[in-house]
Each structure stands twice: as structure tokens, then as C-alpha cells.
Image: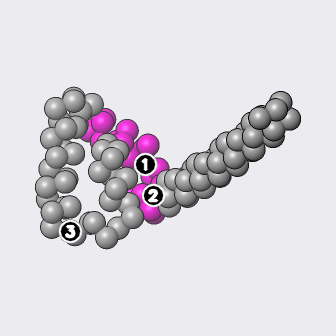
Amino acid sequence: MNNDELNGVAAMDMEAILNKSQKILAEVQEALIKSEYRQAVLDANIQSTWACSRYQWVEKINAEFGQPNESEIFFAHKEFKEKFLKEKTVKSSFMSPFFVNNPI
């Protein structure tokens, strides 16, 4: 191969890499939009249910019961998985993965 052919192959490779990078970036941006939407829905649901934001709700719980330690957080996370996910009472809700992955 001469230099022009090598440059052509390199340009094709770079174009393929650029296209793949743009596709991945678009997927990440879409995931962020969905994540922000789900968080907004979650916050709105908590506000309408408990008449305060999620953060105010957490502050009220911490004021009432104190800040949880690591073992309490782990136990609550484990108990949630055992009781709700195994019984499949919450599994159909789109919010259940949020609570499983982000226990308060």
C-alpha cells in the first residue's frame, strides 16, 4: 500500500470510530434524560404523597430517628429485597429499581 491508500484506510477507521462515539454519546444522553425524568416523577410522587420533597422527607426521618449507620442501611436494603422483590409486589413498578439501587 502506498501512503495515499494508508491515509484512506486511516480516515475510514477514524470515521468509524467517530460514528461509534457519536452513537454512544447519543445513548448516554438519552439515558440521562430518562433518568432525570424518572427522578422528577419520583420527587413529584413523594411531594404529593407526603407533602414535602424527597430531601425534606429524609431530613424529617433523620431528625426523628437519627442518621442511619452503615449496618442499618445494609439491613434495610436487604429487607426490602427479601420482602418486596421476592413477593413481586413492587417489582412491576419502574420505581422499584431506584429504591433497590439507592436505598435511603
At 33% from the left edge and 52% from the top edge, which residue is drawn?
Answer: 99
Q: CA distance from mark 1 to mark 3?
A: 24 Å
Which numbered disc, 2 or 3, marks the residue that appears first in the sequence? 2
Q: Are marks 2 and 1 in contact (CB under 8 Å)?
A: yes
Q: Nearer the viewer, mark 1 or mark 3?
A: 3
Look at label 2 and name its amino acid. Leu
Q: Is residue 101 left or right of residue 86?
A: right
Residues drawn in magenta: 43-66
Which numbered disc, 1 or 3, marks the residue that appears first in the sequence? 1
Toward which corner of the image does residue 81 lie, by quadrant?
bottom left
Disc 1: which residue: 54
Q: CA distance from mark 2 to mark 3?
A: 20 Å
Disc 3: which residue: 88
Look at the image and say whether residue 50 sits in the magenta stretch.
Answer: yes
Q: Identify the secondary structure beneath mark 3.
A: loop
Q: Which mark is residue 64?
A: none
Disc 2: which residue: 42
